[in-house]
């Protein structure tokens, strides 16, 4: 029936990701849980996040910058300079 068609604002994937960033921080300590093998990450703002996916991760040093994004059904942690994402939930 005719009429004006509204268009969504066009954004690049980088801009869309920047809008979804919930937190930028630096990991100052990480520790692996014995039973499940999940990782706990302590950030420089004293928040603690736990890995919720079952991927095997190995870290040599736990001093890196991260972005925590709202992933729709939870949160994703992305390490600056590395590909991939880690599903996480906030513990403290």
Image (spheres, rainbow, N blue to C red):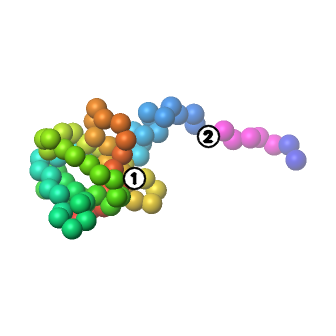
Q: Which residue is at 21% across, 68% downward? A: 35
Place of residue 37 in the rendered image (x, y in percent of width and height, measured from the top left)? 23, 60
Q: In the depicted view, which residue is nearer to us: 71 or 19? A: 71
Position of the C terminus by quadrant? bottom left
Quarter-of-image position of residue 59: top left
SS category of the residue bearing label 2: loop
User: Do the CB atoms of the residues marked 2 and 1 lie less than 8 Å apart?
Assistant: no
Q: In the depicted view, which residue is nearer to us: 62 or 74? A: 62
Quarter-of-image position of residue 54: bottom left
- Residue 48 in sight from this viewpoint: no
Q: Which residues are magenta?
A: 3-7
Q: Which residue is at 33% across, 53% downward? A: 55
Q: In the depicted view, which residue is nearer to us: 80 or 18? A: 80
Residue that label 1 marks: 70
Residues packed near mark 2 inside 10 Å, few (<14), some (14 to 19) or many (20 plus): few
SS category of the residue bearing label 1: strand
Q: In the depicted view, which residue is nearer to us: 61 or 79? A: 61
Q: Which mark is residue 10?
A: none
Place of residue 16 in the rendered image (x, y in percent of width and height, measured from the top left)? 47, 39
Per the picture, the main secondary structure of the magenta-coloured stretch is loop
Q: Residue furthest right?
A: 1
Place of residue 85 in the rendered image (x, y in percent of width and height, measured from the top left)? 36, 46
Residue 4 shown in magenta: yes
Quarter-of-image position of residue 73: bottom left
Place of residue 91 in the rendered image (x, y in percent of width and height, measured from the top left)? 23, 65
Give the label, 2 or 1, closer to the camera.
Answer: 1
Residue that label 2 marks: 8
Q: Is residue 32 above or below residue 27?
A: below
Q: Which residue is at 39% across, 39% downward? A: 18
Q: Which residue is at 88% across, 47% downward? A: 1
């Amino acid at each position: 029936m005719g009429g004006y068609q509204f268009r969504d604002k066009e954004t690049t994937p980088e801009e869309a990701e920047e809008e979804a960033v919930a937190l930028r921080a630096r990991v100052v300590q990480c520790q692996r849980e014995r039973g499940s093998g999940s990782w706990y990450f302590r950030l420089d703002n004293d928040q603690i996040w736990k890995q919720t996916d079952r991927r095997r991760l190995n870290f040599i040093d736990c001093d890196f910058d991260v972005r925590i994004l709202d992933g729709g059904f939870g949160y994703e942690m992305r390490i600056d300079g590395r590909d991939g994402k880690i599903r996480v939930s906030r513990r403290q």
